[in-house]
Image (cartoon, grey):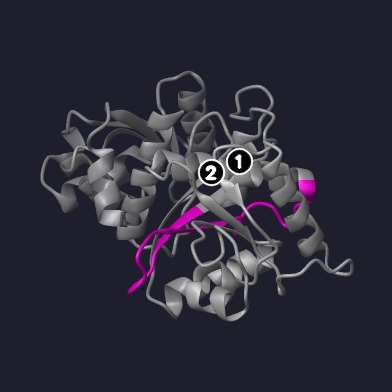
């Protein structure tokens, strides 16, 4: 499985609708145009209607009138975020996507008690990476939402990531809770949490996956490194999901894979009423398309 195959997989499902907040963004328009062309999804585009129409038609003549695209005027970014969230809440859309709007503004609408998308679960960021010369997708969680998750939050972060991985065809993903070492050290909270998560999985409290940790990054992804250190595990060297202990670790790993390893990525926020595509304004149109594909597959799995 790679990200291009994932885009193809997304086209095989019943069509979903994506609500985009503040869609007046070049990379968003590029991703929307490509997604419509590939028949991945239909779109509700909220924001500056005149600007969105102009950008769509500059991309492709008549695109603003495409049957799979509906443009709804919103006087401000706050309003566009609220309208997009309400569209998902009212089942008019199946996926929420961030456009040219600050993350804080969108999340404020998502977490609104009256019309938001909260389910009582922890919201967490799940990123699927395609790394050159690596034989499978690697998932990293959580690099964007939870700053220093405690054990209970980590349980839900794992469950969110497992659900996303399963929606992409990985029936029983292997989860590696990362730490600096592969032994339990009472002075290192990440190792204690990893050991408890492993035991909870063994006792059936966390299902549909295999968890083993703590594992350092090399032992999680390299069978050679794990064997060299004498680690016998069904997860070591074969991990599908890397659970990071803090947002700083996740952020550095995420950006290192992109900028040093030239990895491609698609990412979603999981745990809400519907998948949320929360890409950075610096992300490419290609990355936004991959994220849409992850979200569509996830929405079809729920």
Would you say residue 279 sits in the magenta stretch? no
Left or right of 265 in this view: 26 = left
* Residue 108 x/y as whole percent: 64, 39
Quadrant of the rendered structure where residue 144 is?
A: bottom right
Q: How many marks?
A: 2
The crowding category of the residue bearing disc 1, from other C-alpha atoms within 10 Å (few below 14, some 14 to 19, many at least 20), is many
* Residue 273 x/y as whole percent: 55, 28
Q: Give the residue at the far left of this rendering.
A: 61
Quadrant of the rendered structure where residue 14 is?
A: top left
The crowding category of the residue bearing disc 2, from other C-alpha atoms within 10 Å (few below 14, some 14 to 19, many at least 20), is many
What residue do we see at 51% from left, 69% from top?
221
* Residue 64 x/y as whole percent: 20, 38
Q: Give the residue at the far right of this rendering.
A: 187
Residue 162 has which mark? 2
What residue do we see at 35% from left, 62% from top?
284
Q: Are marks 1 and 2 in contact (CB under 8 Å)?
A: yes
The answer to whether residue 148 is seen in the rendering is: no
Query: To which residue does mark 1 refer?
Result: 159
Q: Nearer the viewer, residue 286 or 192?
A: 192
Q: What secondary structure is marked by label 2?
A: helix
Q: Is residue 253 above or below residue 281?
A: below
What residue do we see at 41% from left, 45% from top?
170
What residue do we see at 18% from left, 43% from top?
38
Q: What secondary structure is marked by label 1?
A: helix
* Residue 50 x/y as whole percent: 30, 41
The answer to whether residue 18 is seen in the rendering is: yes
What is the distance, in whole Å, between disc 1 and disc 2 at their CAs? Answer: 5 Å
Residue 136 has which mark? none
Left or right of 105 in this view: 46 = left
Q: Quadrant of the N terminus?
A: bottom left
Q: Is residue 94 above or below residue 171?
A: above
Q: Which residues are magenta?
A: 127-151
């Amino acid at each position: 499985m790679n990200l291009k195959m994932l885009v193809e997989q997304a086209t095989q499902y019943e069509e979903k609708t994506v609500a985009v907040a503040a869609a007046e963004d070049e990379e968003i328009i590029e991703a929307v145009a490509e997604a419509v062309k590939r028949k991945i999804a239909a779109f509700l585009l909220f924001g500056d209607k005149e600007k969105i129409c102009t950008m769509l038609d500059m991309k492709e003549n008549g695109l603003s009138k495409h049957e799979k695209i509906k443009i709804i005027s919103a006087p401000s970014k706050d309003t566009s975020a609220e309208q997009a969230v309400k569209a998902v809440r009212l089942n008019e859309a199946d996926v929420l996507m961030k456009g040219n709007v600050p993350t804080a503004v969108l999340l404020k609408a998502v977490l609104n008690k009256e019309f938001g998308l909260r389910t009582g679960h922890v919201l967490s960021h799940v990123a699927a990476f395609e790394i050159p010369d690596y034989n499978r997708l690697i998932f990293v969680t959580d690099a964007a939402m939870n700053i220093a998750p405690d054990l209970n939050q980590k349980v839900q972060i794992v469950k969110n990531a497992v659900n996303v991985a399963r929606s992409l065809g990985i029936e029983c993903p292997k989860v590696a809770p990362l730490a600096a070492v592969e032994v339990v050290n009472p002075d290192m909270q990440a190792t204690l949490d990893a050991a408890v998560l492993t035991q909870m999985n063994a006792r059936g409290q966390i299902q549909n996956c295999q968890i083993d940790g703590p594992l350092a990054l090399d032992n999680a992804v390299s069978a050679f490194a794990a064997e060299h250190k004498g680690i016998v595990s069904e997860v070591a060297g074969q991990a599908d999901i890397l659970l990071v202990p803090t947002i700083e670790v996740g952020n550095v790993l995420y950006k290192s894979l992109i900028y040093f390893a030239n990895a491609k990525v698609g990412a979603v926020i999981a745990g809400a009423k519907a998948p949320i595509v929360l890409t950075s304004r610096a992300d490419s149109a290609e990355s936004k398309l991959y994220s849409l594909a992850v979200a569509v597959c996830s929405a079809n799995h729920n």
